[in-house]
Image: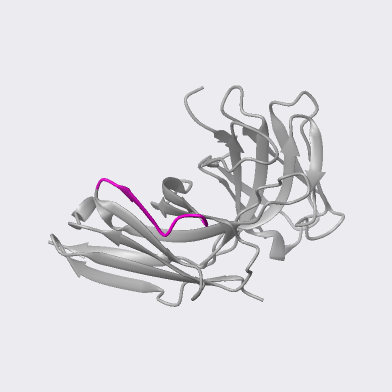
Amino acid sequence: DQQVKQNSPSLSVQEGRISILNCDYTNSMFDYFLWYKKYPAEGPTFLISISSIKDKNEDGRFTVFLNKSAKHLSLHIVPSQPGDSAVYFCAASAGGIQGAQKLVFGQGTRLTINP
Amino acid sequence: GAGVSQSPRYKVAKRGQDVALRCDPISGHVSLFWYQQALGQGPEFLTYFQNEAQLDKSGLPSDRFFAERPEGSVSTLKIQRTQQEDSAVYLCASSLVGAGLKETQYFGPGTRLLVL
C-alpha cells in the first residue's frame, strides 16, 4: 500500500506564477514531513521540512503547508523560476522505537516551469 | 568530504553476478540509510545504520541483499546473485544525529545498477 501519494505525475507552470505541489498520506503515525527536489542523474536535494506540531513552514520562495486532519501537505513555490524545473518528492517519517527516521516517499511530481 | 559520495556511479552486471556498492557519508554523520529507487518511483527504504549498528533492515527485499558499516563510516551494500528485478538506482543518505531526533537526510548521487 502506498502510504504517501503524489497524485499528479506532472505539473506545468508559467515562470513567475505560483507552483503548488500536493501530497497525501495515510499513516497517522507520520510526524515529520519533507520535500526533496531531484535533477536527472543526481540524488534528491533537501528543500524544506515541517513537523506535525506546525501547520506552516516558510523558507524564501518555498512554503510547506500541513493539514493533519486531511492528511495532506502541499509545497508552494512563488515566484516559480526555470531552475525549479525538476522532480519533487514528498517524504514522511514516524518516530520508531530507536528513532529510525526511515523516510517513506511519494512517487514524485515532475514540475516544468515555462519561460 | 562536502557531501555524500557513492561509487560506482553506474554498474552493469550479468544476472547471477555479485555486486558491491559503496557509500561515503558526510564526515561525522551518525546515521546512514540505503534506499532503492525503481524507474518512475520514489525511493524505498532498505536499511539503516546508527554508527556501526544496523538497527533496521526491514526493507531489504531478500537475503541476497546485505549491508555493512563496520567502522561506523563507509558503508557497503552487497547484492549476491543479481536478478533483473534488482535493476534500480541505489541511494545512500546520511544524517548528523541518531535516534529520537528529526534530522534532514542528505543524499548521494546514487549508483545506477543494470542487471542484464
The x, y position of residue B66, in whole percent, is 82, 46
The x, y position of residue B12, in whole percent, is 63, 50
The x, y position of residue B60, in whole percent, is 78, 55
Q: Which residues are magenta?
A: A52-60
The x, y position of residue B45, in whole percent, is 67, 55
Whether B49 is drawn above or below A29: the answer is: above
Quarter assignment of residue A60 = top left
Whether A17 is drawn above or below B98: the answer is: below
Which residue shows up at 35% across the image and 67% down it?
Answer: A21
Colour scheme in use: one colour
Quarter assignment of residue A13 = bottom left
Determine if the magenta segment contains residue B50. Answer: no
Name the residue nearer the viewer: B73 or B9. Answer: B73
Q: Can residue A19 be seen in the rendering of this structure?
A: yes
Name the residue nearer the viewer: A112 or A78. Answer: A78
Whether B107 is drawn above or below A69: the answer is: above
Q: Can residue B7 be seen in the rendering of this structure?
A: no
Task: Pick the quarter of the image with the C terminus of chain B.
Answer: bottom right
Name the residue nearer the viewer: B16 or B9. Answer: B9
The tally of labels here is: 0
Tell me: A15 left or right of B76.
Answer: left
Which residue shows up at 59% across the image and 41% down it?
Answer: B93
Quarter assignment of residue A115 = bottom left
Which residue shows up at 32% across the image and 55% down it?
Answer: A63
Farthest front residue?
A53
